[in-house]
Image: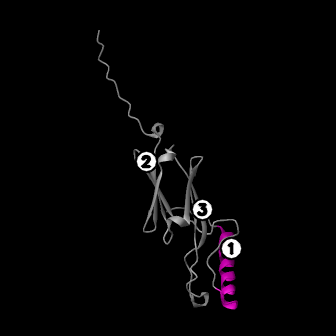
């Protein structure tokens, strides 16, 4: 069983956010998408990163986003995925009973554990899954060292 440090202030801040949300929705009858403090990302997509002999791959869950909604860059051995999920204006705000999905700006900065060939990176998106495949640089690929067998030297 893992030991988890309890932070009472975190619980108090979460409670304060919930009470503020309740007051906004009950008294002012406004429904607004989840947002964060100005200047910070309001949500972060889940990612997986795995490695094979010749490449690094990052997969990010970005349901509802299209390629035009995101930007991918590599700088200083860091993969940056950023974009925005926009709140739909097709339905009137007063008609919502619950909003649980996060909307707004996001940014993930993922340190890369190996050198890659930046000019050969390929990014694809399909069914809400972004896949970024990054071929390893030659110096980062594992190299097998041959083992020499020396003969017995008996005198």
Q: Main secondary structure of the magenta part?
A: helix
Q: Is residue 45 visible?
A: no
Where is mark 2, residue-wise? 55
Residue at (30% x, 13% y) in the render:
153
Q: For the magenta stretch, what is the residue range?
A: 7-30
Residue at (38% x, 31% y) in the render:
145
- Front residue of 149/79: it is 79
Q: Secondary structure at mark 3?
A: strand
83 sits left or right of 27 in the view: left
Considering only vertical position in the picture, is 92 above or below 81?
A: below
Q: How many angstroms separate mark 1 from mark 3 (CA)?
A: 23 Å
Q: In the image, which is nearer the foreground, mark 1 or mark 3?
A: 3
Where is mark 1, residue-wise? 13
Residue lying farthest to the front in this orientation: 68
| Contact, mark 1 vs mark 2 (Cβ under 8 Å) | no
Q: Quadrant of the C terminus?
A: top left
Q: Secondary structure at mark 2?
A: strand
Where is mark 3, residue-wise? 107
Which of the two labelled residues, at mark 1 and mark 2, occupies the earlier sequence position? Answer: 1
């Amino acid at each position: 069983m893992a030991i988890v440090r309890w932070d009472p202030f975190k619980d108090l801040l979460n409670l304060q956010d919930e009470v503020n949300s309740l007051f906004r929705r009950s008294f002012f009858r406004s429904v607004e998408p989840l947002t964060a403090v100005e200047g910070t990302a309001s949500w972060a997509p889940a990612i997986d990163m795995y490695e094979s002999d010749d490449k690094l791959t990052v997969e990010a869950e970005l349901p509802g986003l299209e390629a035009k909604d995101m930007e991918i860059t590599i700088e200083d051995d860091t993969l940056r995925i950023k974009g925005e999920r926009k709140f739909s204006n097709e339905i009137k705000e007063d008609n919502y009973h619950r909003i649980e999905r996060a909307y707004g700006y996001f940014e993930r900065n993922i340190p890369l554990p190996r050198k890659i060939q930046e000019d050969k990176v390929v990014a694809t998106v399909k069914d809400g899954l972004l896949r970024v495949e990054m071929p390893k640089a030659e110096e980062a690929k594992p190299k097998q060292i041959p083992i020499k067998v020396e003969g017995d030297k008996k005198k």
